[in-house]
Amino acid sequence: RALGRPAGPPSTRQLREAEEAAPVFQYAGKAARRKDRVFVWGFSHSGALGVPSFVKPDAGWKKPRRIQPTPYRLETEEKISSAACGYGFTLLASNTTDVTKVWGMGLNKDSQLGFQRSRRDQTKGYEYVLEPSPIPLPLEKPQQTRVMQVSCGRAHSLILTDSEGVFTLGNNSFGQCGRKVIEDEIYSESHLIHQLKEFDSRVVQVVCGQDHSLFRTKKGAVYACGWGADGQTGLGHYNITSVPTKLRGDIAGVNIVQVSSYGDCCLAVSDEGDVFGWGNSEYLQLASVTETTQVNVPRHLPFKIGKIKEAACGGTGNVVLTEEGNVFVWGYGILGKGPNLIETAVPEMIPPSLFGWSDSNPDLRVAHVRCGLSQFAALTNRGELFVWGKNLRGCLGTGRLEDQYFPWRV
Amino acid sequence: LNAAPRPPPRQQIRFLPTPAAGGGAVELVPTRVPVLADHPLVRGPRFKRLKIGAGHRLDVKASGVFVLGVGHGNKLLTDLYNCHLTKVYTVGGLFGKATEDFSDTGKLVEKTTFDHITREKLERILAVIQGTNQKALLMYSNIDMKTQEAYELAVKGLIRPMEKSPPIITAVRCLQFAPPEFQLEIHCLHETQQYLRKIIHEIGLELKSSAVCTQVRRTRDGVFTLDDALPRTQWDLQSIRDAIQNCQLKVKTELEKTL
């Protein structure tokens, strides 16, 4: 007779037992941490994004990608702690104690990435570097010194170390590298990297404008060198300076905790929350204190918007972040409050609801702000990035090529 | 309903012949008489059947606010649908399991560990979900980004797609987190409950583990909240009439605001 019964649908008890006997998979352990990643986007034709296949595709039928409109992950060997974008070139730095600490990619016509020996011809250097290549630094103790920060200007770069001062490379036609201007100097394929050590205390922040450099020291002083025709060196004259000189004016004696510059205007924030500005004011950046279009001495900007935590200068517009986490913009251009607000001399607040603040989300604050030449970016405490401004060649990273008139999440 | 007092019958004016006072000739005198066609014996019971329509769907495994329209209310239902208001759900989930239909009663697919999950990681995933849905919201609302009115609507948070669109989540919040269980509050548009269960499953995948959905409960549907909803014990005529009356004003203001 039929000894085996046909299998019917499994009863609840059978199901439960099968579930308990199922193997448990582990995909991530308890100590799993997120790997820090670098993302690049924007104009890639000069190799500044560090992905060689964008400029020279690996298959013959593929076309080179001129613009990368959305963030693209860049693989790096080390964990990158500081990055800076210049005019067609990028610097990445890691604070490791290994021998290679800084990588550069992009335009190298003024040796702003150091000397990159060409593999085809050993005597010549590369004019365009397509992938992150190490920059050799003349360090005394290469296995102890750490690189804290890098900064890029139009054609020069500054690298800040913790114990060996500041290294400058690139174009020096206006003294922005902190050394004497040599007439008819040829900057391409140059091996020269200058080291700056004479400051009143350790340098803790370096900032590059288009053709000038700013150094902030631990004692709260600011030094400047480079082009000064718009007063951006803040030294009281409109000539070039080839040796870093301390700034006076309204910031003499004030403990400055942050300096910022990108174009020809500069802003400094003190520990008490005041903001000082100098440089170009053609776009109403400093119009709250003066009618002149160039200011060559730091002036205090009497804004009544609360204690200021961070400031950032763009080419034509400026942005500050207050202690409460509000963002204020002023200047000229697409400021982030719709197409009707083109210019203002007095800071205007951007409504926090545009950054995701709402009744169900009241703890949202903006943590950092940064500027490009005509773009703004804000990072919130939830780790979201918002960008707005002119979208030149996909630099905003939104995936569209149109200008963005209010903050948009990337 | 039929036992309730009827409205008084219509009156009409008819000219009836009555003998004039003190005289013999018959005159036509206007008098009010009730219309016979409205008489209950002629008409019969007032309500033989009721038209009841349902608002947004709620499937068998979910619970919560379910909006019904009675009679003329069905037309208001269509108008409310065209307002495209957000709905709020409380969704409960469980880490460690993955099933075929994303709920805890389905066939088991895989079991995983979940001790590496912290509240901070969950919040980060929720922020990513909200951000991508924010972009979808702006795209499907078909507003030109370059205009001043787009900026003003974005500030107030009123940008919404006004036509058919795929499901969009406007806000997510973590209410409770006690691994392996967690509870989220989700504000969404044009969604189905199975989509919400799929979202829970995907959250589990993003956190390098797996998750199933244990509970989907709608706490708000446009203007109707849990306070307006009638529980099973109150499904009688009086409570229904009171509830309809309470909501009438709210519905009217919402419709006027949007349309």
Image (cartoon, coloured by chain):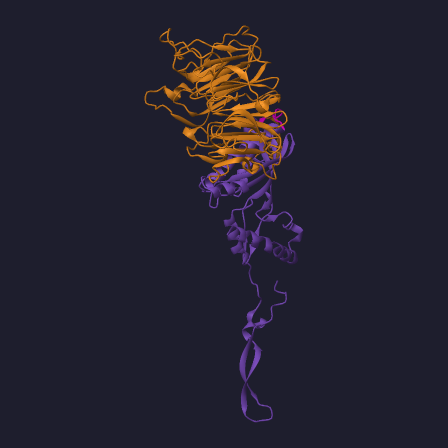
Q: Residue furthest right?
A: B233
Say if the magenta span includes residue B115. yes
Which residues are drawn in magenta?
B111-118
- The spot of residue B143 in percent (x, y) is 45, 42
The answer to whether residue A345 is seen in the rendering is yes
- The spot of residue A86 in percent (x, y) is 45, 21
Quadrant where the N terminus of chain A is found in the figure: top right
Q: Is residue B61 above or below residue B31?
A: above
- The spot of residue A31 in percent (x, y) is 61, 20
Residue B70 figure quarter: bottom right
- As drawn, is A253 to the left or to the right of A182? right
Residue A121 figure quarter: top left
Q: Colour of chain A?
A: orange
The answer to whether residue B101 is seen in the rendering is no
Helix, strand or loop: magenta stretch? loop
Chain coloured purple: which letter? B
- As drawn, is B1 to the left or to the right of A330? right
Q: Residue furthest left?
A: A61
